[in-house]
Image (cartoon, rainbow, N blue to C red):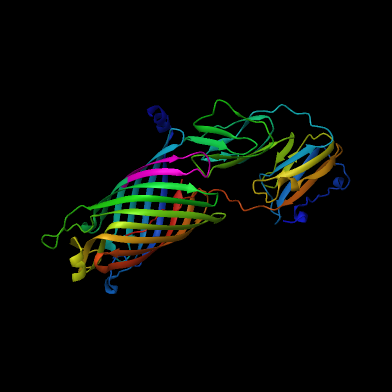
Amino acid sequence: MTAARLAAALVLGGALAAPAIAAELRATVRSEQGQPVADAVVVAVPQSAPAKPPRPKTEQVEQIGHEFVPRVKALLVGSPVSFPNRDDVRHHVYSFSPAKRFDLPLYVGTPAQPVLFDAPGVVIMGCNIHDWMVGYIYVAESPYFAMTGADGTALIAGIPPGRYAIRVWHPQLAAAEESTSRHAELSATGDGALEWRIALKPALGLRRAPLPGRQGRY
Amino acid sequence: MAALVLPALAQAQWVPQLEASLLHDSNFSRAQRKEDVASDFALHLRGTLDRAFAVADRGELTLTLDAKAQQNAHFERASYASLGAAGAYRHKLGLGLTAPWLAASAFLAQEDARTAVRDVRRAGAALLLDKRFQERLAASLGAAYDRSVQLEDLPVVAGISGKAFSLQGRTLFARGSYALDEGITILGGASLRRGDVESTTRRNLQIFRASNAIALDPAIGPDFVAYRLSGARTRSFTAGLSRELDRRSSISATLTADDTRAPAGLNYRGVVVALIYAYRR
């Protein structure tokens, strides 16, 4: 992928031509082919002054129908997360990711203690029994983040004016997350919009559908 | 152990799986001589109900009810229905996607064909080591024992058993799968089986001398005879392509080539081509 392809294209609603945007940021993420990308995380990290850290709230990633729901979850560093199992079989949720290693041996219902996500980064989760179950937790170091919906758009509201590094992450992002980073000066005088075009790797989720089981005959 | 298993029993539910296959067998009769080789198409349906129970931290016990039916296009009297049950225990040797699974399984089934001589009770057991090397690549190695018992002894030659479909054998097998792209998987496999085989041919002295059980097999034709040959070795190779239609269903095409070497030079080959739709809830 070229740097040009990765370059965030500023969609100028007029205001973004100058380094001044509103306290509300609308970010659109599209694939190289122009298709909207859902489940992308957009994070705005303040550069001028550290963000006043809000109190993290307890988040939830459920297991429903042998899948993680939601499959991608963004949350603020320091957030505790509970993993309720809504299925009628037991799951064994774990992660080897450097940002958070944890292991919740086979359980039903909701584990008594939530897991604390105390370092920023991407955490890939799996179930040790059902290999196809894969989920992602994006632990943001900044409270200003949002996820894109089916239309590829994320809305980050209530951003204090200042200079921000804004970047995008997605489970299929082909390049390093840092390569999507763009700087912008945000002000409280109007709405702004940013658009990224990102290259995506094929979605190589582990297969859940059955494989045929025939062996040779004799 | 009961404390671990009983809560799981209360939680588990039966999960249905359905498989519908269209098959072509180039040597359905498993005959040696060209004039005896009979090919056929068949529609094969299989439905299973699985119930899985978690055992300890990394084990899973699965009980399966298994129903099959096969309708042959030409040799209709070889069509059959089967009802069986299976149990399997698999244990993950570690934590994570690449940790191997060790599994032991056993099954019992009764097969009712339209021709009485083909009615059998089948049983078997297998040990399997299953390992995923990365997201795309998985492979397994296993050993299996199979036994079928013909329900009715129908001798045609005095002093020689009529249970030509009573067979047993041991198989070593290896299978692998590689995910090419989104939803498409390449399948491969090889197996080596040693044991008894059944071959249906017109009467001939060579196979008569080598066989140890003989029965008429009207499913293939009025002048066809089923012979049991012991000490045979069958090598099988399977290749296929499977496409995931969604998270619960797939369509696959497989080709299995078999090469059987039986004593006295009674060798035969066959190729089975299958188009398979599978759904698992």
Q: Above or below — where is B36 with respect to A199?
A: below
Q: Is residue A80 magenta?
A: no
Kindly indicate the quadrant of the structure image that contains residue B61.
Answer: top left
Residue drawn at (43%, 37%) of the image: B59
The reply to whether residue B76 is visible in this rendering is yes
**Residue B188 appears at what percent x and percent y?**
45, 58
Q: Is residue A14 above or below residue A73?
A: below
Prevailing SS of the magenta stretch: strand
> If the image is split into quadrants, where does the N terminus of chain B sit?
top left
As drawn, the residue found furthest toward the right would be: A18
Percent position of residue B67, x then y: 34, 49
Q: Quadrant of residue A143?
A: top right
- Asked whether, in this view, residue A191 is left or right of residue B142, the answer is right
**Residue B218 location (% of width, % of height):** 21, 64
Image side of residue B37 versus residue A66, left or right: left
**B93 within the magenta span:** yes
What stretch of residues is rendered in magenta? B84-106
**Where B218 falls versus B81 (above or below)?**
below
Spot occupied by residue A217 in the image (x, y as percentages of width and height):
34, 59
Q: Does residue B244 show up?
A: no
